[in-house]
Amino acid sequence: MAVCGITVIPIGTSSPSVSACIAKVVSLIKESSFKVMPTPIGTAIEGELEEILKLIPKVRDTIYSEGLNRVVMNVYIDERNDKQLTLKGKMESLENKLGGKV
């Protein structure tokens, strides 16, 4: 199991707002049966690494289907072979270290 973060930056939109494009990306990820945690500046995904990597071209295609010609994506992967990573587990670890809820 891996935890992945993806930030999608559509370029060439007619407006400074990109939330409509990002909403389509988040919907795609949710429909793909991954555990998802949208944030104000990216989306966290939990799943098998190989399946997450198959998702990246679909994200790109979603942006291009909006008529845009350029997208920048930052993808970061957290994977361990000594224990199971989950979004919930990572948040609980952070909360414990902060002494309460984030």
Image (cartoon, rainbow, N blue to C red):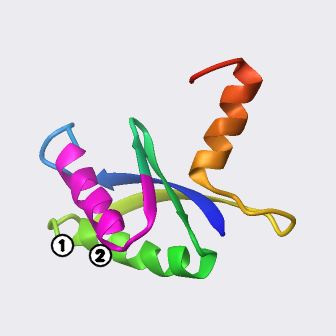
- Label 1 neighbour load within 10 Å: few <14, some 14-19, many 20+: few
User: Element type at marker 2?
Assistant: helix
Nearest the camera: 65 or 27? 27
Left or right of residue 58: residue 13: left
Q: Position of residue 12 (x, y in %)?
A: 23, 53
Compared across the picture, whether 97 is left or right of 64 comes to: right
Q: Is residue 75 magenta?
A: no
Q: To which residue does mark 2 refer? A: 61
- CB-based contact (under 8 Å), mark 1 and mark 2: yes
Q: Residue placed at 73% from the left, 28% from the top?
A: 96
Give how far across and how far down residue 20 sits, in percent: 17, 49
Q: Residue furthest top?
A: 99
Pinpoint residue 3: horizontal percent, then vertical percent. 61, 59
Residue occupying image coordinates x 43% and y 56%:
36
Residue positioned 76% across, 25% down in the render: 97
Q: Is residue 36 above or below residue 101?
A: below
| Left or right: where 20 falls relative to 27 | left
Residue at which label 1 appears: 65
**Structural crowding at the residue carrying mark 2, measured as other residues with C-alpha within 10 Å and reported as few (<14), some (14–19) or many (≥20):** some
Residue interval drawn in magenta:
19-36
